[in-house]
Image: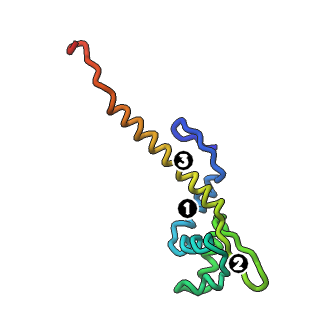
């Protein structure tokens, strides 16, 4: 549980997990791999054929995503199948939603302050 500005947000991600998820998503190739594997499972070999990089480089990207929990990898015969993990995406989205709620709360408070009528001072009244 993390407390932000009087607001309690329950997160299923620890700070270390949040760091791993967003570090993994900071790379365009890894985001593309997540997108593709959320649409359907793919072998590491088929993923490697999509990018202008070595098989080993794609394996490293998949390893970063696996460590972050954004994809899972399963052996099926000689192939390693990669599947996106929608639960991890939902947890990351929940974190971003909590940040948005904090921001919206601040904006609402600012709006309320700006909408308050001026109160006359003793010199004016």
Q: CA distance from mark 3 to mark 1?
A: 15 Å
Q: CA distance from mark 1 to mark 2?
A: 23 Å
Q: Which mark is residue 98?
A: 3
Q: Residue at x 59, y 70 (%)?
A: 34
Q: In which image quadrant can residue 22 be found?
A: bottom right
Q: Is residue 89 left or right of residue 80?
A: left
- For marks 2 and 3, the one nearer the N-term is 2
Q: Residue at x 74, y 75 (%)?
A: 74
Q: In which image quadrant can residue 16 be found?
A: bottom right
- Between circles 3 and 1, the one closer to the viewer is 3
Q: Is residue 110 above or below residue 75?
A: above
- For marks 3 and 1, the one nearer the N-term is 1
Q: Residue at x 58, y 74 (%)?
A: 36
Q: Looking at the image, do the residues carrying marks 1 and 2 touch, with CB atoms under 8 Å apart? A: no
Dot 2: element: strand
Q: Is residue 75 left or right of residue 103?
A: right
Q: Is residue 15 left or right of residue 76?
A: left
Q: In the rendered image, which quarter contains the N terminus? A: top right
Q: Residue 50 placed where, x, y %?
A: 56, 84
- For marks 1 and 2, the one nearer the N-term is 1
- Residue with the mark numbered 1: 22
Q: Is residue 46 left or right of residue 123?
A: right
Of 42 and 30, the residue lying toward us? 42
- Residue with the mark numbered 2: 81
Q: Residue 4 placed where, x, y %?
A: 54, 41
């Amino acid at each position: 549980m993390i407390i932000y500005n009087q607001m309690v947000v329950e997160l299923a991600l620890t700070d270390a997990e949040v760091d791993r998820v967003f570090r993994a998503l900071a790379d365009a190739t890894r985001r593309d791999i997540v997108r593709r594997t959320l649409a359907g499972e793919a072998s590491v070999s088929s993923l490697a054929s999509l990018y202008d990089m070595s098989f080993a480089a794609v394996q490293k990207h998949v390893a970063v995503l696996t460590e972050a929990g954004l994809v899972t990898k399963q052996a099926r015969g000689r192939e390693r199948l990669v599947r996106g993990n929608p639960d991890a995406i939902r947890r990351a989205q929940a974190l971003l939603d909590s940040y948005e709620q904090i921001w919206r709360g601040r904006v609402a408070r600012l709006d309320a302050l700006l909408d308050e009528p001026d109160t006359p001072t003793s010199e004016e009244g």
